[in-house]
Image (tube, rainbow, N blue to C red):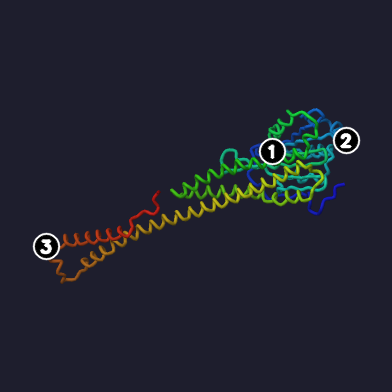
Amino acid sequence: MLRPAPRALISQRLEQRPADPPSGLFVHGGRQPTRAELIVFEAGRPVCRELPEPSELAALRAAATPLWLRIQGVGDRPQLDRILDHCAVPELLRPPLLEMPQRPRVECLGEVVLVVLHRFRSPHDPTRLVSDQVGFLLLPGLLVTVEEAGTMPAFPTLTDWLLTMAGPVEDRDLDDILHHLIDDLLDDLFPILEHISNRIDDLEEATLRRPRPSQLTLAFQYRSNVRRIRRQIWPLRHQIRLMLRQHQSILGPEAVGGFQDMAELVELLYESTEALRGHLDAITEAYAASIGNRMNQVMKTLTILTSIFAPLTFIAGIYGMNFEFMPELKWRHGYLYVLLLMALVGLIQSYWLQRRGWFQDWTAQR
């Protein structure tokens, strides 16, 4: 009888989905129709079959035949309960798999391993992420995968590899398949992060050359995507290492080695997200610095104009006074003399400012 520790193996709902839902969930109103199939690990080779009758499924479970139950879509909860009943899956383990969205988790208790992850994709716009939940449940002789919005066939790469292999069942233990599936989901994050990194490099160069408000908006969008991925990775760091320290009996030596590699992979992903967050912070600071430099350049230009025209305004103000006795007012060429004086003062002012480097554009591209 399964006796979990307090707050273990229970549903932990998220307040909102980590990213936008994929198109399949949009089409079906948030719940994709349920579709299920079974991979039976027979003595000769694995065989992919449609879901058999309940009696035959119960017979396979009773005969301890290794099974991989693949469920896609959670739109029909009664059908899912019937399928899991025939597979003898305890009621306690179903909410974390069927209630969405769930917090990412890796939990192991006795002969049960429960894993909940979110599969991220970037369909068209690199600033937009979509996610769907994928749950894994490992029991003795049974591996259950539940995809919220899967495509047919489920996990095609691993499925094709399994169906083309021949040999005894022991060569393909279910715990090894479990860590391969999780590793496949985590590996999909690297192309997304690499694509974001390339876009961030281009964005940084554009920000330094010609800052625009749209660039700051892009930086915030990329930062939001990186933060979403980081939130899904953060809980796994502690949980995988805790599971490895517990030395669970359901995990064989190869599976333990695979989960140790997975722990390193999670650390690498976490470090990558932290590096990208720091890069985005640098872009925000560079944008603020560029805008500040441009504002300083504008203020400097206004200061130059003010300093040049201030003495000219002073001269014009003197000769604009209405006193009766002003000797210069009687000069025949007084108007020309004042213009020449003002031009000379302006040239001297410009030369002096140019020698001091005031005309240099600090925002020019170099």
Task: Work out whether residue 205 or residue 118 is closer to the camera in this orientation and state it.
Answer: 205
Task: Work out whether residue 315 or residue 363 is closer to the camera in this orientation and state it.
Answer: 363
Task: Label 3, secondary structure: give it.
Answer: loop
Q: Is residue 308 left or right of residue 329?
A: right
Q: Is residue 40 left or right of residue 158?
A: right
The residue that mark 1 highlights is 149
x then y, percent, for residue 322: 20, 69
Task: Work out whether residue 54 or residue 175 is closer to the camera in this orientation and state it.
Answer: 175
The residue that mark 3 highlights is 332
The residue that mark 2 highlights is 62
Is residue 30 visible in the rendered image? The answer is yes
The image quarter containing residue 93 is: top right
x then y, percent, for residue 40: 80, 31
**Tag 3 and tag 2, C-beta contact below 8 Å:** no
Q: Earlier in the sequence, mark 2 or mark 1?
A: 2
Residue pushed farthest left?
332
Give the vertical position of 80 relative to 266 (above or below): above
Q: Earlier in the sequence, mark 3 or mark 2?
A: 2
User: Which circle, 3 or 2, is nearer the viewer?
Assistant: 2
* Distance between mark 2 and mark 1 Cα atoms: 31 Å
How crowded pointer 3 is (Cα within 10 Å; few <14, some 14-19, many 20+) is rated as few
Q: Earlier in the sequence, mark 1 or mark 3?
A: 1
How crowded pointer 2 is (Cα within 10 Å; few <14, some 14-19, many 20+) is rated as few
**Tag 1 and tag 3, C-beta contact below 8 Å:** no
Q: Amino acid at mark 3?
A: Arg
* Distance between mark 3 and mark 2 Cα atoms: 122 Å
The image quarter containing residue 22 is: top right
Q: Amino acid at mark 1?
A: Ala
User: Which circle, 2 or 1, is nearer the viewer?
Assistant: 2
x then y, percent, for residue 154: 71, 34
Q: Amino acid at mark 2?
A: Ala
